[in-house]
Amino acid sequence: MTGQAWHIKGTSLLGQAAADMLISDGLITEVGPGISAGGAQVLDGSGLVALPGLVDLHTHLREPGREDAETVQTGTAAAALGGFTAVHAMANTEPVADTAGVVEQVWRLGERAGLADVRPVGAVTVGLSGGHLAELGAMADSAARVRVFSDDGRCVSDAVIMRRALEYVKAFGGVVAQHAQEPRLTEGAQVNEGEVAGRIGLAGWPAVAEEAIIARDCLLAAHVGSALHVCHVSTAGSVEIIRWAKAKGWRVTAEVTPHHLLLTDELAASYDPVYKVNPPLRTAADVLALREGLADGTIDCVATDHAPHPVEDKEAEWQAAAFGMTGLETALRAVQLAMVEPGLLDWAQVADRMSVRPAAIGRLNGEGAPLHGCSLTAGSPANLVLYDPAQRGVVDPAQHASRSRNSPFAGMELPGQVVATFLRGEPTVLDGKLAR
């Protein structure tokens, strides 16, 4: 790579000591005080926190098939503006990403866009139907090198199919990411089962529907000796089950979304479908447990579950509206509000939960994949984000790069601003705006 060299001056590395950073030929070539770099483009990093480029394990890019909601181009633009340098694109596209051909198409669209590395997630079952395993081996051997498999949006509810999937991916070091939702317990469910659901007259979604599947799958993963990742954990009970599984030494990891760290089911009382999401927003007690679980490492990482929808799919009566919220452009800001400002995480731990761990879970730390989640030291790939935690601003989805506007944070003041994002030494964002 022979792009412009960059000299970032006086930035705070992981929120700690300020230093200069020199970027050249796609790498961080020097880090330290008072670097001299003639000919390099200078970027003033004073007051900015430098973090490794963020990695999202759970992004819906919608392409192919639902380009009215999002495309790989618009979704990765949103990702770059949020500080992400890699995203994992979920499989519930049209057609479903259940073959080598479809995952390679998504991967190539990401390569063409050039704003973030797109790692396709392969479906576990054909057509997300739950009936038969998809072409897991062919997707793993494809140019897209798929290592994460999920039927997200639907649960792999059949225990035999889930066991077979865990056994299959073990052969090539893959991971099954489960959408934990027992379908029989959530038929017609709209909001969290509890006081709010009873008050507003919408069908309840019990916590046990999530927790039962997580408990079953932790046991299956232990039995097989394979890797399980739990998507969008939302209840206090789920945190306890995952904590128990990890204490056993089982290969279980988990994620939480920014919206489940900040928002509660009280918002459903507005009947505004922007707050309709799967799994649903839970209680304040659940939010507290999720924050504690992320802080102590029981929950490994933050993942956005960025789920864009066109206006007509969200601006409907609650029961007819689609589930889902956008999240890429507000994730780091939401984490600052939920975790950093209360003192639950420092910036080094944010880097761990939003870059290092998701990169490891998504297998972006070797095996021929582009490297992410690396330390900000000389010789590392120059995938990084410069973030200003002192700024504050009201979220305006109309200003977002995403094609959809269904942000639950619309009109809410959040801290922080992504100032610059670099992908292998090339800026994708400068001065808070797309650089390409």
Image (spheres, helix red, strand yellow):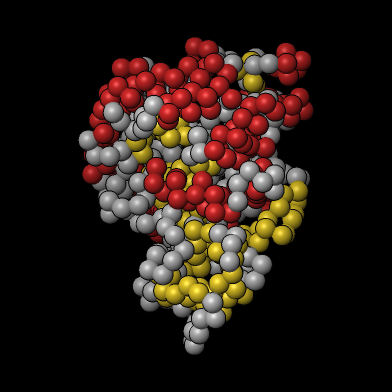
Q: Is residue 83 above or below residue 328?
A: below
Q: Is residue 99 above or below residue 316?
A: below
Taking depth in this image into account, of 18 and 316 the one nearest to the observer is: 18
Residue 276 visible somewhere in the drawing: no
Task: Return the x and y of residue 119 as percentages of the image width and height.
Answer: 39, 48
Task: Return the x and y of residue 436 as percentages of the image width and height.
Answer: 52, 67
Residue 368 visible somewhere in the drawing: yes
Residue at image coords 49%, 65%: 422
Asked where in the image residue 374 lies, by quadrant, the reply is bottom left
Horizontal side of 383 relative to 186 (left or right) equals left
Q: Residue furthest bottom?
A: 38
Quarter of the image with the N terminus is: bottom left
Residue at image coords 60%, 40%: 258
Task: Return the x and y of residue 270 as percentages of the image width and height.
Answer: 77, 28
Marker count (numbered): 0
Taking depth in this image into account, of 411 and 129 the one nearest to the observer is: 411
Horizontal side of 284 relative to 426 (left or right) equals right
Task: Return the x and y of residue 50 as percentages of the image width and height.
Answer: 56, 63
Horizontal side of 105 relative to 4 (left or right) equals left
Residue at image coords 37%, 57%: 371
Taking depth in this image into account, of 224 and 184 the one nearest to the observer is: 224
Residue at image coords 41%, 37%: 91
